[in-house]
Image: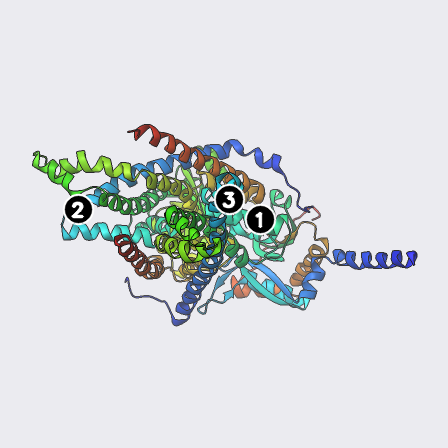
Amino acid sequence: MFFDTALSTNDLIFLARGAGMTLIVTAISVFFGTVMGIVFGVFRYQVGPWWAAPLTFVLDIFRSIPLLIQLVLANAFVTTVLGWRVSGFTVACGVLSLYTAAYCAEIVRGGIEAVPPTLRRAARSLGMSWGQDMTSVVMPLAARIALPSWIGLALGVMKDSALVYVVQVVELLKSAQILITRLQEPLFLLIVCGSFYFLISFPIARFGGYLERKWSRD
Amino acid sequence: MFNYNFRWAQALNSLPRMLEGALVTLEVALLSMVIGIAIAILLTLFRLSGSRILGAIAATWVEIARNTPALFQIYMVHFGLGGFGIHLSPYLSLLIGIAFNNAGYLSENFRGALKGIPDTQTRSARSLGMTPLQAFRHVVMPQMLRISFLPMTNQMVWAILMTSLGTVVAMNTDLYGVTSDLNARTFRTFELFAIAAVIFYLITKTVTLSARLLAARLFRY
Amino acid sequence: MKSSILAMSVIAATGLAAPAFADKLDDIISSGTLRCAVVLDFPPMGSRDESNTPIGFDVDYCNDLAAALGVEAEIVETTFPERIPALMSGRVDVAVASTSDTLERAKTVGFSIPYYAFENAVVANEGVEMADWEGMRGKTVGATAGTYEAIWLEEKVAEWGEGSFRPYQNQADVFLALSQGQLDATVSTVEVAEANVASGNFPGIKIVDKAPMVPDYVALITLREEYGLINYMNLFINQQVRTGRYDELYEKWVGEGEPADLTVQGVYR
């Protein structure tokens, strides 16, 4: 009974489209979130905790409120309060990008802080500018430290993107629910859907763990 | 500036109900952490046991918890187990779903923490006549929990945020559930969810700050 | 010179202000699409066929409305709790989503005259002893969050002071929970109950009784201030009945028989 399913090719295409939506939302959010996260992280490190306090406060909000509420609130604010005509997809990507940026800024700051200050002073005393120091000394070292956490973050965003159904974006989990409504095979469809997340997340997470182990040794 | 008419007074009338919901949220999160830590310790023991089967059970648990969405896990606890005739109330489904997730992540944190505890400690404890379990219980575990204190605080914050997912299993007594119930009646979406957001923020901040104070007291030496 | 600047700014000001007079009805006609919120886990009013295309009474009704306006219809799927937020957030122009015309909702959205009327049925799990609707007392009951019947049922449970109420996010989850035995009973429209029992998708459920609620009149909704569109929709619904299209859709989606009377004796709308 378990694998005797009424799932047709059409339904598979439908599911695949949902999976595509999950991946697109994730890719856009991780990209913009990372760019913003690097800017915010460097800024926070550079100006010191006192001047960065307002930014720290704002970013902290994204990590202290359920994503579901962030999405509902942002959607209500942009479309009802401001009255803009914005698609659910845009709202979803916007919120997820900021959400990613909030976590990414922490990772970036941690990465920069882990670079020994003596090394940076040595670089500067060799006549390197701030920019040269940042790009040729800090970035390669900090990136190594930060990459495993960043991979974890990117995978986290993929899993959290399951919540964007709340602004009418039909992603993987929502597509599965739509099919469940029609086919009434909840267990089978949910397992298919769960496996998809698992098959993407598991190898990448393993790779991240491998990098972490490898780089912490040398 | 806005064409929108804010009606804060109407939404604020619901504040007592929402605060009751906040208590339920906190209760679920705390219980899920207690259960999650207990299971995570068990899973860590499974991994250390050297048994293939126990190790595989622990690994499967950890990988599923860490590599699928929490929303999926909670939905599966309710409707997945429901398909096998195991019926859990919305409250229990949410609690077990979050505890499942907590246990997976915490077990991985514990594993990381164990790397920082030298093997020689276990061996000297064993040579003092302790059984392996005693050595773990009295020597390794206290240090493991101390090293993992910060990740545990983070997981607690996650647990609080995850309670909002109970809505998919018809949970309607927690903060998110109460808020969406009120929203379905009055449609003051922005006002209601803004208040819920502030309450969530205050809860998570209180939890992180008290954890920090607690850590300062507990680990003074 | 000065007066010409003044004249120009007056022209500019009226030119800028002009779009403000275009209401939603104009917007829809000029944009060429009518975006309807439809709930698609609510057969026979809304569901999906084998190729996952939206079908049902509400889908056809939206298509008819779009055709009358001379524009393309775009079906936006929403759940019951999300349909009014989707409207308020401008995600859709109207909701053709079997929305009961409650006074509480009328504080937020604008209702047309009723376009359909439901009766509600009590549906129970076969393993549960239940003779009539009062048998729900003390049981675990549930319904779709944010619907007319959910609000009624939750109040009943509160009134009885025993048993518990569970609001699931969509109709499918309610029937899934009922079929699995997680719920003892639910209240849903007779149409939905009959369709779900007949489909065989949910084994182990039975219709017990009619729910003692006044007929559940449902209307089209749009933003509260869009009188032009509301007027248009009122006339449209009148025409649907007058031309026999209402009977036709009823026969197509619900079956043989008389569709519900949409007027109330003894009172004006």
Question: Circle 1: is it few (<14), some (14-19), or many (20+) Cα within 10 Å?
Answer: many
For mark 1, name the chain: A
The image's mark for residue A47 is: 3
Q: Nearer the viewer, mark 3 or mark 2?
A: 3
Residue C248, placed above or below residue B24:
below
Report which residue position mark 2 lands on: B48
Please, which colouring scheme is shown? rainbow
Mark 1 near mark 2, Cβ–Cβ under 8 Å?
Answer: no
**Quick one: B208 or C63, which is closer to the camera?**
B208
Q: Position of residue C21 (x, y in %)?
A: 76, 56
Distance, label 1 to label 3, CA atoms, is 34 Å
**View extreme (bottom): residue:** A9
Tell me the residue that label 1 is attached to: A76
Give the residue type at disc 2.
Leu
Residue B217 place in picture, x, y as percent: 33, 27
The numbered disc on residue C260 is: none
Using the rendered image, report if marks 3 and 2 lie on a common chain. no
- Where in the figure is residue C35, as x and y percent of width and height? 60, 61
